[in-house]
Amino acid sequence: MMSPALAKVHRDVRPPIRKKLSSERMKVLMVAFACGPNRGSEPGQGWNFAKGMADTHDVWVLAYAGFRKVIEKELALRPVSGLNVEYYRLPFENRRHWEEGIDRGGLAEQLHYYFWNLGAGALARTLDQKIGFDLVHHVSFMRYWSPSAAASVEAPFLWGPVGGGESAPKSFYASFGWKGFVFEFMRDAVRTLASLDPFVRRTAHRATVTLATTDQTAARIRQVGGKNISVNGSVALRLDEIDRLGQLSAPKSESIRFISVGRILHWKGYGLGIRAFAKMVTAAPGDPVGSAEYWIVGDGPERSRLETLASELGVGKQVHFTGRISRNCALDELSKAHVFVHPSFHDSGGYASLEAMAAGKPVICLALGGPGLQVTPECGVAVAANSPKQTVDDLSEAMQELASNRTLRENMGRAARARVAHEFSWEVLLDNIQSQYNLLVGAARFVSNPT
């Protein structure tokens, strides 16, 4: 039964979903290396695409064998008609990864994904010979600089949404510390090598249509030979999630609280947030703004450095680090906050900012990556990132304005929630993908059978 709040989202906020342009069920091969029910990030993305498109098509998912247990458990409890899953793993893999589903990390994960796609291409061709797919769709991982097993199939090929082309401006590298500097240098090097990789270029060339998460990624894809590229949002929330986030209680304290949520990594930009917060607080001693708090929810390798920074700037008692906590606890902290701060340099998607908007929080972010596309002037502030000083000054100004203007915060919060429901629900995203399917298959059939 749809809750009254969710019904209101449907009735008052979202426009009607367009009807499927074709009543015919297509046979779709979906390459979703990461595919996990009830998971966030890439696995959740892969599963939601697969399950969503199986409502109207016969979908075969090609996934990594490490997700077999969670998928089979979910399908045993909640079968999905029209969904078939095939698994692939590389020979001689460690059992704890493919059988127990233990994640890799760092370079090992990158190399594994690269070679998995090369190996899975043979299985994709075998399935195509047996089934005869109408189209093939790559959904996970969402990065342009690795090849896709989907390129091995001769059917029309939809690549994306894919990201990974976003970059931190080089003027910020010196502020990242030596580890962050090395990370950014290596990331740039990998993407440069990808532009020369014949398997990556083959994927880009084979794609009939490519959906890029941002303009920066679109430009990178053109460099590797991509064509027919359009910028398309990559992240979405289910309507029940939008409903649940919208029902979080409003902050009870009059003391202004800013919040950031996510792993504490250099490219998340929390150092900029702390510097901007300190600048705002020290400029308003004795003022209510001067007693504001900044909560950083999560943990990671940069935490110690940021704690030291907050102390050195004189706001050590006003900047709070929760460490790693459960999702329910994180949502509880979000409910207590007035403004969400997300100064990330290269988020292709931006789930954290999207969830904050759904919860009715105005968002302050950088005008980069996915969050820079999500946040409009009506629902937050997207700050240009030209230099560290300019960015800190502009972030601080945005913090001060929102901290001192309750009406503005509330109006932006309402607009943020409406924007998520209107533009970033899974129903809207799947409807957009459906339109791409119809265009791809329709064009292919016209070429094969011109009248």
Image (cartoon, rainbow, N blue to C red):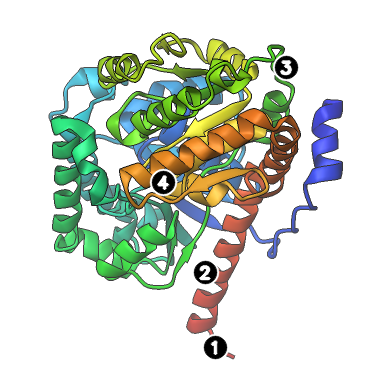
Disc 2 vs disc 1: which is toward the camera?
Answer: 2
The residue wearing badge 1 is 450
Q: Secondary structure at mark 3?
A: loop
Q: CA distance from mark 1 to mark 4?
A: 39 Å
For the point 29% across and 59% down, which residue is it? 152
Query: Which badge, 4 or 2, is on the more N-terminal residue?
Result: 4
Disc 1 vs disc 4: which is toward the camera?
Answer: 4
Q: Secondary structure at mark 2?
A: helix
Compared with residue 321, is residue 421 higher up or lower down, i.e. above or below?
Answer: below
Disc 1 vs disc 3: which is toward the camera?
Answer: 3
Relative image position of residue 194 (x, y in whole percent): 18, 56
Query: Which badge, 4 or 3, is on the more N-terminal residue?
Result: 3
Disc 4 vs disc 2: which is toward the camera?
Answer: 4
Query: Which badge, 1 or 4, is on the more N-terminal residue?
Result: 4
As drawn, the label of residue 249 is 3
The residue wearing badge 2 is 440
Query: Which badge, 1 or 3, is on the more N-terminal residue?
Result: 3
For the point 14% across and 44% down, which residue is it? 186
Q: Are marks 1 and 3 in contact (CB under 8 Å)?
A: no
Relative image position of residue 23 (x, y in whole percent): 70, 61
Query: Which badge, 2 or 1, is on the more N-terminal residue?
Result: 2
Q: CA distance from mark 4 to mark 3?
A: 29 Å
Q: Are marks 4 and 2 in contact (CB under 8 Å)?
A: no
Relative image position of residue 19 (x, y in whole percent): 75, 58
Q: CA distance from mark 1 to mark 3?
A: 59 Å
Q: Is residue 269 left or right of residue 93?
A: right
Q: Quadrant of the C terminus?
A: bottom right
Q: Are marks 2 and 1 in contact (CB under 8 Å)?
A: no
